[in-house]
Image (tube, rainbow, N blue to C red):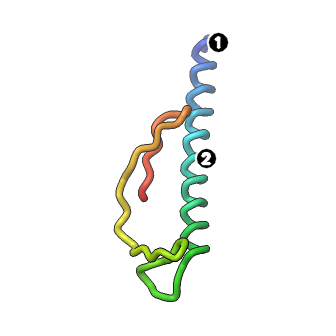
Amino acid sequence: MTYREAERCIRDAAFAIGRALVVLFLALRERYVTDRHRSNHPGRWEWFERVYRVAPPIARNFTTVFGVVRYFR
């Protein structure tokens, strides 16, 4: 294996770890928001005196320096 090939493999692995950390961050933020602002009524929650209903998650793409991360919101 040449140095260039090794460097490319290391870069690909680092970017994969970066994307995984972005997914973890998004999941933790979603959990924080839903846990902190959950009301006593299932299927809805409140945020700054506004009531929101829980909807099915929609797939979205988030472009980062590590590449595109697909998540659901």
Position of residue 40 measured from the top left corner of the image (x, y, whole percent): 52, 88
Kindly indicate the quadrant of the structure image that contains residue 19.
top right
Label 2 neighbourhood size at 10 Å, few (<14), some (14-19), many (20+)? few
Quadrant, the C terminus: bottom left
Which residue is situated farthest in the bottom direction here?
A: 40
Residue 2: percent from left, percent from top: 61, 11
Mark 1 is on which residue type?
A: Tyr
Of residue 17 and residue 39, the one placed in the foreground of this image is: 39
Q: Is residue 7 above or below residue 56?
A: above
> Residue under circle 2?
21
Q: Is residue 27 above or below residue 60?
A: below
Badge 1 crowding class, 10 Å Cα cut-off, few under 14, some 14 to 19, many 20 or more, is few
Residue 42 percent across, percent down from the top left: 44, 84
Dot in front, 2 or 1: 2
Q: Is residue 6 above or below residue 29?
A: above
Residue at far front of view: 49
**Mark 2: which secondary structure?**
helix
Q: Quadrant of residue 30?
A: bottom right
Residue at the image position 62 percent from the left and 33 percent from the top:
14
Residue at screen point 56% across, 29% down: 12
Disc 2 from disc 1: Cα separation: 27 Å
Disc 2 marks which amino acid? Leu
Q: Which residue is identified by label 1?
A: 3
